[in-house]
Amino acid sequence: MIDIPNNKQLILFDGVCNLCNSSVLYVIKRDKKDKFVFAPLQSDVGEEIIKKFNINTVNTDSILLYNPKKDRLTYKSTAALLVAKDLGFPTCILSIFLIVPTFIRNWVYNYIAKNRYKWYGKKESCMIPTPELKSKFIA
């Protein structure tokens, strides 16, 4: 059973990707309403969500946003823009791109995702959160 605190959404990310880890730190810094918790896709929680929603990890190279209240999973550009929407000004302005058709947004997203290791590098293992950030992560 996935235990996510009330009024939170879970962001699942590639724990070995430098771009993804930087993005998580960006969100944490700007999450003034404390809406998000995090887990690497490679974690037990990540695997549980992947199984629950029958996600093909070969075809889905993406951030996943799980909303437990709605029992809904979003991914790729939609997930990223829904996260941005809750981060306050000026980041929330990015949510205007939700009006762009999904196939166009995801084309851009997929291009970045495909090249992220080449452009930003990769870690040997998942990020270990500092003691101050530990409460933001679900094991």
Image (cartoon, grey):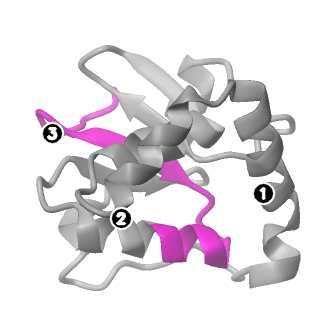
Q: State how many labels appear.
A: 3
Q: Which residue does the numbered mark 3 point to in the structure image?
A: 5
Q: Which residue does the numbered mark 1 point to in the structure image?
A: 113
- Amino acid at pointer 3: Pro
Residue under the image location 55 percent in, 40 percent down: 97
Tag 3, which secondary structure? loop
| Mark 2 neighbour density, 10 Å: few (under 14) some (14–19) many (20 or more) | many
Question: In the picture, which quadrant includes the C terminus?
Answer: bottom left
Q: Are marks 3 and 1 in contact (CB under 8 Å)?
A: no
- Amino acid at pointer 1: Ala
Q: Earlier in the sequence, mark 3 or mark 1?
A: 3
Q: Which residue does the numbered mark 2 point to in the structure image?
A: 27
Instruction: Give the alpha-carbon distance from disc 1 to disc 2, as whole Å.
Output: 18 Å
Q: State the image coordinates of residue 73 (x, y, percent, origin top left).
A: 49, 24
Residue under the image location 85 percent in, 34 percent down: 59
Towards the viewer: 116 or 108: 108
Q: State the image coordinates of residue 38 (x, y, percent, origin top left).
A: 37, 55
Instruction: Give the alpha-carbon distance from disc 3 to disc 1, as whole Å.
Output: 29 Å
